[in-house]
Image (spheres, rainbow, N blue to C red):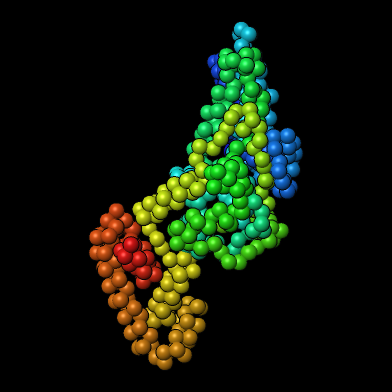
Amino acid sequence: MLQFGRVDEVNINGTCLVLEACLEFEIRRLVYVSTYGVVFGGNEIVNGNESSPFFPVDDHVDPYGRSKSIAERLVLKHNACPFEKNNGKCLFTCAIRPAAIYGPGEERPREREGVSLLYRKNKDCILCRKKGILGVGLLPFKIGDSNVKTDWVYVDNLVLALILASMGLLDDISNNEGHPVAAGQPYFISDGNNQTFGFKGPISTFEFLQPQLKSLDYDLPKASLSVPRALMLGRIFWAIYTVLYPWLNRWWLPQPLILPAEVYKELGYVPMVSPREGMAATISYWQERKRKTLDGPTIYARLFVVIGITSVFSAAYLPDMVPPVSLLRATSLILFRSMWVVRTIFLLAMAAHIGEVVYAWNLARRVDPANARAWFWQTLVFGIRSLHFLLKRAKS
């Protein structure tokens, strides 16, 4: 999220346009979807609530949190703002601050994900990018303390909160005349701390993700990286803007622990989907999605295959005038004694590789016809490493 201008254009300027439209066309209610990040910027928060102050705008570590903070303040300041025609009516506003969102289909990549794994502090996709990154082996370590607990909210529960917030802005129902209960208020939203739902409140990111990843045959990384070192890496990649930036950035920070008390008391919010049910639905979604997509070898296996084949070909057939070739040829001669053996090994490997590709194409047409072409090309490039995953798909 290095595009500061675009972030501000959408979150700040876009919000201003929405507010102007509400006033011009006399829209009575506006519920703004904000983020926990408006009160959080890396500082530890335990048992925070709606009375927690805004985090200083200039101290935010990312443009997203900063822009959302500014936009939410604008929305709340416009509460009870009279319409241009001054007909006695006005705009009522409130803000919903969701915890990290999870659920089937929730995969907005702008975000978050992060602390311990790839979890950013802003509400967003939990699994979509992690799945791809874990699948190719690009996540070698966890980040942060496994004791850090984080709030989560199932997408259906968030929708319920938005509906209740909208109803809380009505000024023509009993006890709300002239001043709706939600007017000008921010509300934190999460799955809550209701043990009857099978949920004991905020949970470790590692503990939360484990059943999702296990259901997809992925494991959490064993190694850990401290937050200070992760931040140092983030600053380096921030500066050089490499292709690895989307996975290594500055949002690996201890997450806030918020108690969404006001939304229960004022809006009557009670999560309609338990975390156990939400997790089951999420796992089912990703398992079905995985069955419809390709599995493949890790990035290390891919590099091994490509570099290995290229090296053997170079040693067998390219002229010595290319500097690396002479070294590769010398190494090959040490191992195989003669160029005839080196070339024979390469030709046998190519013959076996062609056989793998033909077999993969025929097998994929039977067990996964929708992805048969993709299996063909993947096996053509990565050989037996790709075929291994296709055989596993066939068995399942």
Residue 272 relative to residue 229: left or right: left
Q: Residue 390 falls in which quadrant of the image?
A: bottom left
The correct choice, above or below, for 45 with respect to 52 in the image is below
The correct choice, above or below, for 200 with respect to 372 in the image is above
Q: Residue 31 falls in which quadrant of the image?
A: top right
Residue 390 relative to residue 209: left or right: left
Task: Find residue 258 and report its horizontal and vertical position in percent.
Answer: 67, 42
Residue visible at 66% across and 27% down in the picture: 185
Give the camera-side residue of 90 and 16: 90
Quadrant where the image shows the C terminus: bottom left
Give the camera-side residue of 201 and 116: 201
Residue 44 showing in the rendered view = yes
Q: Residue 72 falls in which quadrant of the image?
A: top right
Residue 340 relative to residue 47: left or right: left
The correct choice, above or below, for 336 with respect to 105 in the image is below
Extreme residue toward the front, this view: 196
- In the rendered picture of this protein, how many numbered marks are placed on residues? 0
Residue visible at 36% across and 55% down in the picture: 291
The correct choice, above or below, for 109 with respect to 141 in the image is above
Residue 10 relative to residue 347: left or right: right
Task: Find residue 20 and report its horizontal and vertical position in percent.
Answer: 60, 21
Residue visible at 67% across and 45% down in the picture: 257
Task: Find residue 274 and report its horizontal and vertical position in percent.
Answer: 51, 43
